[in-house]
Image (cartoon, grey):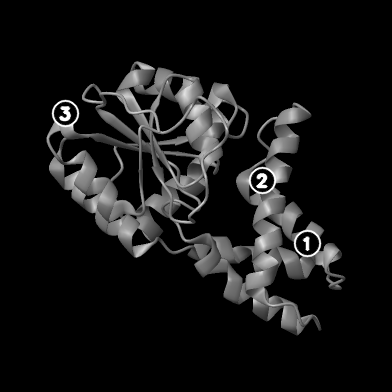
Amino acid sequence: MAIAPIAQVNTLAFDIFGTVLDLGGSLSEPAGRFLAEHGSAVSGARFWEDWRGRQRIEQYQDNLFMLGHSGYRETCRRAFIYCLRQHDVPFEYADVARFMDVYDHLRPYADAAAGLQRLAGSGRYRLVALSNGEQSYLEKLARDNIGVPFDDVISVENAGVFKPHPAVYRTAARILGREPAEIMMVAAHSFDITGARACGFRAAYVNRYDLPNEESPYLPDFEVADFHQLADRLLAAPDAA
């Protein structure tokens, strides 16, 4: 991995969905109940694998077709419907609309909540949520579900596109009044790391899913397994990070 001094970093920008919030742990079980109620033998865990992958395609298509930011929950809804059809599950749109309320109950990873609290308590960094979610939705999740006092909550709505479009990272730097090299993107998704690094951010890859980096020159400054290791690294002497 590319290792560079990061002592100039004063702002940590956190991906939320899948990095801080445990999507699979929060959604697989209710998805399994929905499937069983609609006569499907597909497990919630198996369905989630397809659903998560399709959601990213929905977001990428919005970017590629220049459709703007249609809304995080809307891309989740469209992906859910696509996967229901993929698995031949009969449904009514009203059933799907009721099911999508599960997104109000997403739970954070325990290590993420603990690590964020350590970082917030240190006073060393400005903590920012930088996410594909809608602004009001992110603020609700930060307050009610994550419970961490982020200094700023920034939605990609401000850029009008989904990650990893470069406008997301450049808009965030402008809103924060920071040089890109002062901001470290923290994400569990390599595409988010690559997008941020390509725009001059520093980056920490929380590789909680044990997946490889992209084949790209825009690699993270370091890689950790969870937020405990992240906090250890970032709260060490600056030169050691």
- Eyeballing the image, is 10 above or below 70? above
The structure residue drawn at horizontal position 74% and vertical position 77%, both measured from the top left corner, is: 42
Q: Which one is in front in this view, the residue at disc 3 or the one at disc 2?
A: 3
Q: Which mark is residue 239?
A: 3
Secondary structure beneath disc 3?
A: helix
Disc 2 residue type (three-letter)? Arg
Residue 193 in the image: state x and y as whole percent. Answer: 48, 35
> Badge 1 is on which residue?
83
Q: Which mark is residue 56?
A: 2
Q: Is residue 31 left or right of residue 78?
A: left
| CB under 8 Å between discs 1 and 3 | no
Question: Can residue 67 be seen here?
Answer: no
The N terminus lies in quadrant: top left
Q: Please tell me how crowded label 3 is: few (under 14), some (14-19), or many (20+) other residues with Cα within 10 Å.
A: few
Disc 1 residue type (three-letter)? Cys
Residue 31 in the image: state x and y as whole percent. Answer: 65, 72
- Eyeballing the image, is 33 above or below 156? below
Q: Which one is in front in this view, the residue at disc 1 or the one at disc 3?
A: 3
